[in-house]
Image: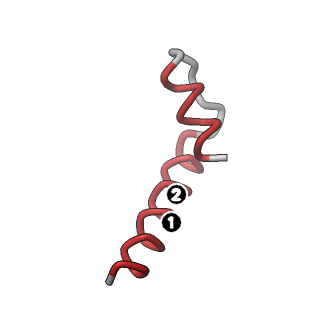
Amino acid sequence: MVLFDQAALSEGAKLSQPAAYVQRVNDLLTRASLLTG
């Protein structure tokens, strides 16, 4: 879902739930940092 939202944003679309997108990106970054920890 993050990838789809990122593609939509790059085309100039507005997200219907921007806060949910930010939460998903934050979760992804948190998980990535735990793996490289």
Q: Position of residue 18 (x, y in %)?
A: 55, 40
Q: Is residue 1 left or right of residue 32?
A: right
Q: Residue at x 35, y 78 (%)?
A: 36
Q: Amino acid at mark 1?
A: Asp
Residue labelled with disc 2:
23
In this picture, is 28 found above or below 2? Answer: below
Instruction: Classify residue 32 by image quadrant.
Output: bottom left
How far from the left and from the top, in percent, is residue 30? 42, 71
From the viewer's perspective, is 23 left or right of 34? right
Callout 1: few (<14), some (14-19), or many (20+) C-alpha neighbours within 10 Å? few
The residue at 59%/50% (across/down) is 20
Query: Relative to 24, is 33 above or below?
Result: below
Placement of 27 over or under 19, stated as above or below? below
Query: Which label sits in the foreground, 1 or 2?
Result: 1
Which of the two residues, 18 or 25, is positioned nearer the viewer here? 25
* 14 w.r.t. 37: above or below: above
Residue 37: x and y in percent read 32, 84
- Looking at numbered disc 2 in the image, what kind of residue is underneath it? Gln
| Mark linked to residue 27 | 1
Q: Is there a contact, CB below 8 Å, between mark 1 and mark 2?
A: yes
